Image (spheres, grey):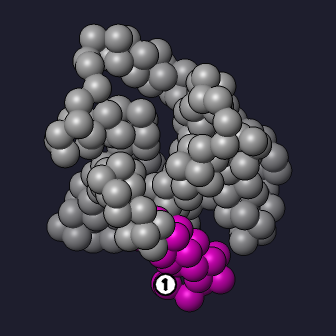
Amino acid sequence: MSLFLVLSAPLWLMLVISFYPMPGRGWRSIVIPFLGGTAAGIAAVALTLSLLTRIPFGKGTGQIFFWAWIRGPGWAFLPLSALLIFLFKKRPTSYSRIREISCWYAGVSFIYVLWLALSPEPGFNAYRVLFLPFVWMAASGGTAWLMDRGLRLDRGLSWLLLAVSVLFASFVTFAPVLYALGMEYWAWITTLLLTVFFGFLIFLDSRGRLG
């Protein structure tokens, strides 16, 4: 029942890859960042498990947000985003890095959704099986697009967009909070719109329509 959850990260990555022509280095330029992302994901999951054993679950809005943040892309993407900005700022380019950035985030996402899928949850759970994949796809797409634009723009606006890219996954965490508070309808709308919107922006970028 969790197959879509497990495959959501690779499927999103394959969609992004299909938008762009094959890079000169072939699949090596895709596999290496993906494996780097899986290593970062394993480290983040290990820290997550250590935190969850110390922090009890609460029903307050702030407690629900923290619980969703530590188990979702908010925490998982935070250290990786800082690392990628540090690495890519040292090697500026004029071309789009969305595909490479997406490979890193897909690796982290795959480890996290695999962990969530293997967690003991008996029966069909719409939140885990159907909703969470779009949370991770929205976070991956939005973070990758914002970071790429920030890396290619002028200094002032560049740092603003890079800061937004670091915080974007935490913003997406509000969707699971809405779901937990009984506003499933708005949670679904927000997550699906973000996924489609940033998927469309990535498509436009691959066609050179955004400059």
Seen at 18% across and 67% down, the residue is 156
Percent coordinates x, y for residue 86 in the rendering: 35, 40
Amino acid, disc 1: Gly
Q: Magenta span has 107? A: no
Seen at 82% across and 50% down, the residue is 26
Q: Which residues are magenta?
A: 190-211
Q: In which quadrant will I find the N terminus?
A: top right
Residue extending furthest bottom?
209
Quick one: 171 or 126, which is closer to the camera? 126
Q: Is residue 190 above or below residue 69?
A: below
Percent coordinates x, y for residue 151 in the rendering: 38, 60
Q: Magenta span has 198? A: yes
**Residue 36 in view here:** no
**Residue 183 in view here:** yes
Disc 1 designates what residue? 211
Q: Is residue 50 above or below residue 193?
A: above
Q: Main secondary structure of the magenta part?
A: helix
Percent coordinates x, y for residue 146 in the rendering: 39, 64
Crowdedness near tag 1: few (<14), some (14–19) or many (≥20) residues, C-alpha within 10 Å: few
Q: Secondary structure at mark 1?
A: loop
Seen at 49% across and 84% down, the residue is 211
* Residue 79 sits in quarter: top left
